Image (cartoon, rainbow, N blue to C red):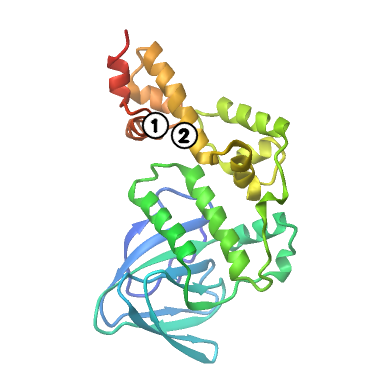
Amino acid sequence: MKICSVEHSRLEDGVEVLSSRKIDWNGIIVEQYQAPPNRVGEQSPGALLAHLLNFPSVQPIHLTQQHGERWHESIVKQGDLVLVPAGQTTYWRGPTDSPLSYLCVYLQPELVTKMAASADLNPDRIELMDCFSRFDPHLYQIAMMLLAEIKSGGLMGKLYAESLTQVLVIQLLRNYSSLQPKIIADRYNLPPRRLENAIDYIHAHLDGDLSMAQIAASVSTSPTYFASLFKQATGISLHQYVIKQRVNRAKILLETTDLPISNIASQVGFASSSHLTYHCKRLTGMTPRQITNSKT
């Protein structure tokens, strides 16, 4: 899904180091860049089709931003956020004497709109607000977790990325929107029958690329709050539950069949045998090969 203009959305002179484009997450792109000294970053009117969250490098840097007719200056440090809503015009400069590393999160506006609507908020009355250098450790932590997932090659799966994206959008609506609404996920509940049906759906589709939207739709529940409701009802997060069930099914196949490990990984929904090995070792203390060799 294309959510930003290739020619104009990225900060000029930045060299891409890591990107989530190959993983193909829904509604969000996360990219890490390196920029040389004397860098100038500039956004053109209407060029940016996505909301941009920018987290500069670890070392404090001096940034100057022009937004409209106003100028702002700040020393931006680790954990600080620069937020540019889609379609806005902004310009900033810095630093002048050292290379810069920064992390960009491009967020599809339609994703924010859908989550606002599912919270019974009027999306036409909600706009994200421009933010220049505000310390937000929560958003920074989410961004770093998404970056770690890119570095792992998508080891935890799309469901994990969707959960993080959901939390990120809720944080933006709470703290960086025109209405600043209070979004309280636990005002809804997940009836036992719907929980049972959701679990049945998960078990029936373990071999596929499960998404939060698919699971929520199977029980006629809004995907916006489904992850929170599921954890509230079960005591375990949705993606952790799915991973655990995949490992459990793989363990049974390893103990009762002579199928190759790569085939078993595919049958239980892991992208590769290495993904199965990682999670199997993490949850059982044994690798798939060790489980196979221990058969009596």
Q: Residues within 10 Å of mark 1 (few under 14, many from 20)?
A: few
In x, y percent, where is residue 173? 62, 65
Residue toward you, 53 or 29 = 53
Residue 217 location, quadrant: top right
Tell whether 71 sits left or right of 231: left
Q: Residues within 10 Å of mark 2 (few under 14, many from 20)?
A: many
Q: What residue is rendered at 38% in x and 34% in y?
A: 279
**Residue 105 in view here:** no
Q: Given contact means CB atoms under 8 Å apart, are the residues at marks 1 and 2 in contact?
A: yes
What amino acid does circle 1 point to?
Answer: Leu
Q: What residue is rendered at 40% in x and 21% in y?
A: 251
Tell whether 138 sits left or right of 263: right
In x, y percent, where is residue 181? 68, 66
**Residue 164 in view here:** yes
Look at the numbered disc 2 and give the secondary structure of its residue.
helix
Label located before the other in sequence (1 or 2): 2
Residue at the front extreme of this rendering: 235
Label 2: which residue? 243
Look at the numbered disc 1 and give the secondary structure of its residue.
helix
Q: Residue 283's mark?
A: 1
Residue 103 location, quadrant: bottom left
In x, y percent, where is residue 145? 41, 54
Number of marks in the image?
2
